[in-house]
Image (spheres, rainbow, N blue to C red):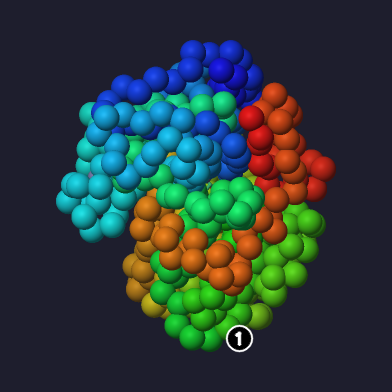
Amino acid sequence: MKALCWYGTKDVRVETVPDPKIQNTDDAIIKITSTAICGSDLHLHNGFQPTMEKGDILGHENMGEVVEVGSGVSNLKVGDRVVVPFVIACGNCEFCNKEQYSLCDVSNPNAEMAREAMGQSPAGLFGFSHMLGGFSGGQAEYLRVPYANVGPFKIPNGIEDEKVLFLSDIFPTAYMAAENCNIEEGDTVAIWGGGPVGQLAVRCAQMLGAGRVIMIEQVPERIQMAQSSGAEIIDFSKEDVYDRLMEMTKDRGPDSCMDAVGLEAHAGGTLDGIIDRVKTATMLATDRPHVLRQMIMACRKGGTLSVPGVYVGAVDNLPFGAAMNKGLNFKMGQTHVQKYMPKLFEKIESGEIDPSFIITHKMKLEDAPEGYKIFNEKEDNCIKIVLKP
Ligand SMILES: NC(=O)c1ccc[n+]([C@@H]2O[C@H](COP(=O)([O-])OP(=O)(O)OC[C@H]3O[C@@H](n4cnc5c(N)ncnc54)[C@H](O)[C@@H]3O)[C@@H](O)[C@H]2O)c1
Ligand SMILES: [Zn+2]
Ligand SMILES: [Zn+2]
């Protein structure tokens, strides 16, 4: 089959690789009909994620048709149409039983590697690093889905792929990030980053009762999209974010702050931003936590920081004393996708939201390397790319 393979920093290639096979009795094989490129893929593309290997197949926002099931799969049959959550979960462990699927205790076969880096291992993920399981992703013609009784969510015919594809990751991610903001009716929520996650998070924060949503971005078409969802805007390339937030909230600060940017934050000519860039470029640091620092300083006392943005290592110079003395709450994590899929599917089906509004590009799998380039460089007004194998 054809698949998009990682070969190193800014080097992805479409290659012919062996078709996936059933390996365990509860595996299924899916023929991919739609798959998307995520901001998390960009962290791999830009070389920030440790334990990647040449030839790894990327892609964790996947849907398609079941073409084969193992003897232990009872929930699915050949011909079913499914969206596959990017988190791989057993459905039976202590954490899965608490619906904390991204913390599944058994789905990561390389748990020892993760334990060394993090103390304990989170769940395995599709199309990520070997530390998180080394599972092949779905930017390919076919995908092997482990624990197939637990993950894949069935979609009835008559509802197009584009409307439901983002149930695999970014719609639940935006929703959980908004839940993690602890929003009370009328609250002010500030969201850093107007990528696909930030755009959906604006809508989710509104659904959960936010009175004001403030989006911090610099890319014009992303600013425009957030504005048309009803967000107020701070363009961080033109204005000081802290000063502007204080002006907008009468020196109080937003009730919650969401980091939908992650470890590759741009920081213009700010001092901390320049130091982060030098340190990550010379391997003295792993992450660029400019947004985290800004959120801690700007958030109101007793407020909440929600971090869906991905970090991989240690962060430098975090004003933790400010966080402690201001009594801030931190909530974060890879998304417990399986928990949110049924509820969010209902919102799509009832017409409350159509997440496809973020799609700007549809491309063939063959053109995925070009897709990575334009999404990464924000060329051609690109906000979200769907690939069609
Ligand atoms: N927790 C999860 O389960 C989960 C799931 C999906 C994505 N993610 C993560 O969420 C993050 C966002 O994903 P995305 O697909 O929207 O990515 P994206 O790269 O398209 O969006 C990031 C946006 O942040 C903006 N940005 C950069 N520096 C900024 C700054 N200093 N202040 C404000 N905005 C800034 C960029 O202009 C860009 O529009 C990524 O880190 C991704 O890995 C996490
Ligand atoms: Zn993702
Ligand atoms: Zn589990």
Q: Residue at x 70, y 58 (%)?
A: 357
**Foreground: 348 or 212?**
348
How far from the left and from the top, in percent, is residue 251?
58, 82
Q: Residue at x 56, y 27 (%)?
A: 140
Mark 1 vs ligand 1: CB under 8 Å?
A: no
In the rendered image of this protein, does residue 192 appear above or below residue 154?
below
Element type at mark 1: loop
Residue at mark 1: 250
How far from the left and from the top, in percent, is residue 141?
57, 26
**Foreground: 150 or 326?**
150
Q: Residue at x 22, y 42 (%)?
A: 105
Left-right relation of 287 to 224: left
- Can you see residue 326? no
Count all numbered tags in the image, as a single digit.
1
How far from the left and from the top, in percent, is residue 216?
65, 63
Dot 1 crowding, Cα within 10 Å, few <14, some 14–19, many 20+: few
